[in-house]
Amino acid sequence: MGTAFWIALVFILIAFGILICRFFIWIKEEKIRIYDIGALLDIGKKQVQANAYGFKPEKDRLMAILSAGEGKEYAGKVAALTTVRTFTKLYNRYDNNQSSRYFFERAYETANMNVLNALRGENGRAYAVCLMLRGNLLSYAIMGHINIYIFRKKELILLSRGQIMEELIKEKVNKGLLSKEAALRISDTNKAYNYIGRDDYMKPLISKEEIKLKRKDMVVIINAGVEKNISIRELEIILSKKHGCKKTAKEIIETIKKKDTKDLDNLGLILIRI
């Protein structure tokens, strides 16, 4: 066997070694998942930005929260910021052996108390959706009106619109507690019936079980301002583009602002690709 054969063999072995290394790197990345995250707020045509968001990434885990505040002057802003700070602070002490439900219940109740204390009698409130990812397993909780979707294969799948009158009416009709005729007389079905910052605390809506996500799925969270000003089809077209989540979030906000809607409300969204 000549020199050329041995040189070729060496190159083949090197190439094979590189492939093996890349394979083990891929395995390691799968074990320690890195999420693509995009979040963006826009003041719209309001005087105060009353939305807030927060993240807590930890190896293959992630906690994310989007909060939308309501109230005169700065009351909504205070409520939203207090809510996000409460969740991120509590998550720092979260034990991974505890269930996500335990965290949600404790965090929402604590946030409700903190908002009441921060506002000191001022009329303000906050809506919030918090999610936890454990690898590709999703759990979430919502208080008030914020939408959460999964974007999969160019289609948005609604998980929940939160605690709004429409969902409460459906529940009461199904249980026989409200007639269909009475339900039809209720006009504002998009109105939230629960919120953070109420004296008579009511629990959030919590996902019944963890949802198994697929590779390249995207979790989409939008507040009411985004929901009212862009159609599902428009969202699906933008989300279908092969961009990072930050660029996609920016395009969604820009698309809404180009419509030049009168009295455009605060806009807030979070995108997370698995």
Image (spheres, helix red, strand yellow):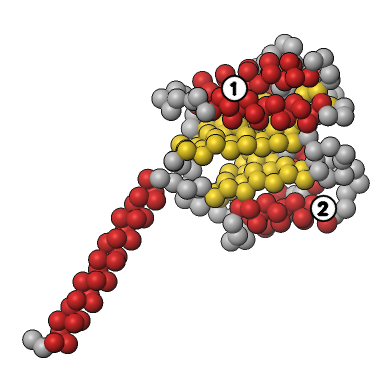
What residue is at 82 percent from the left and 14 percent from the top? 121
Q: Where 36 sits versus 60, above or below?
A: below
Neighbourhood count class around disc 2 (C-alpha, 10 Å): few under 14, some 14–19, many 20 upward? some
Which element type, helix, strand or loop, lies under badge 2?
helix
Q: Which residue, given by chain and number where applicable, does mark 1 sit on?
A: 107
> Where is residue 34 shown, x and y percent of the image?
47, 48
What residue is at 87 percent from the left and 27 percent from the top? 72
Residue 98 image-quadrant placement: top left
Q: Can I make out residue 10 in this image? A: yes
What residue is at 58 percent from the left and 27 percent from the top? 89
Alpha carbon separation for disc pair 1 and 2: 33 Å
Quarter holding the N terminus is bottom left
User: Of all residues shown, which one is farthest toward the top?
Assistant: 200
Q: Which residue, given by chain and number where applicable, does mark 2 sit on?
A: 257
Which element type, helix, strand or loop, lies under badge 1?
helix
What residue is at 88 percent from the left and 49 percent from the top? 261
Residue 105 image-quadrant placement: top right
